Image: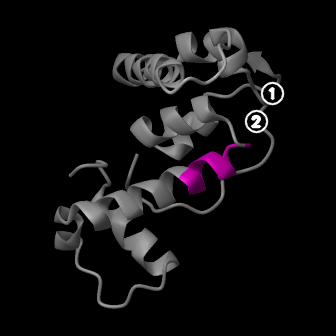
Amino acid sequence: GLMQIMPATARWIAQRLGIKGFDTREMQDPARNIQFGSYYLKHVQNSLDGSPVLATAAYNAGPGRAQRWRTSQPMEAAVYIESIPFAETRDYVKKVMSNAMYYAARFGQPSVLLKDRLGVVPPRKTPLAAAPAGDE
């Protein structure tokens, strides 16, 4: 689908949103798909200390993996990105973050250095908030 939400994640989101009788075929509806994808991305970002880099990695590879790839010390996000062991996820994060820079410029937002936009990945400290099983 549009936001690439796994079926188990879609069911989990439906439960969190209090949607009764949810059927995963509803994810074929673009409005529902975007609603769920947006909800999930916000949940993941909140669960990962608000880091857009961690949220992007988690959206692609799963929150558990993004959490495990953190270290016990803060690190520059660019270093974190380069240390992602999955080439697909590493490339995905790079594309999303570079596109964010591009669109910020297109929409007239003030110019920000990539290093500043990426920020620092905070250290791993606590287990990730509950998320659906089977989506990693």
* Secondary structure at numbered mark 2: loop
Q: Amino acid at mark 2?
A: Arg
Residue at image coords 35%, 57%: 34
Q: Is tag 1's residue or tag 2's residue first in the polypeptide sequence?
A: 1
Q: Which mark is residue 124?
A: 2
Badge 1 vs badge 2, beta-carbon distance below 8 Å: yes
Residue lying at the far bottom in this picture: please name it.
20
Residue with the mark numbered 1: 72
Left or right: 61 as drawn, with respect to 88 = right
Tell me residue 124's x, y (percent). Answer: 76, 36
The magenta span reads 42-49
**Label 1 environment density (alpha carbons within 10 Å; few <14, some 14–19, many ≥20):** few
Instruction: Tell me the SS state at disc 1.
Output: loop
Return the residue nearer the eye: 97 or 89.
97
At which x and y percent is residue 108?
56, 23
Give the residue drawn at x 50%, y 22%: 97
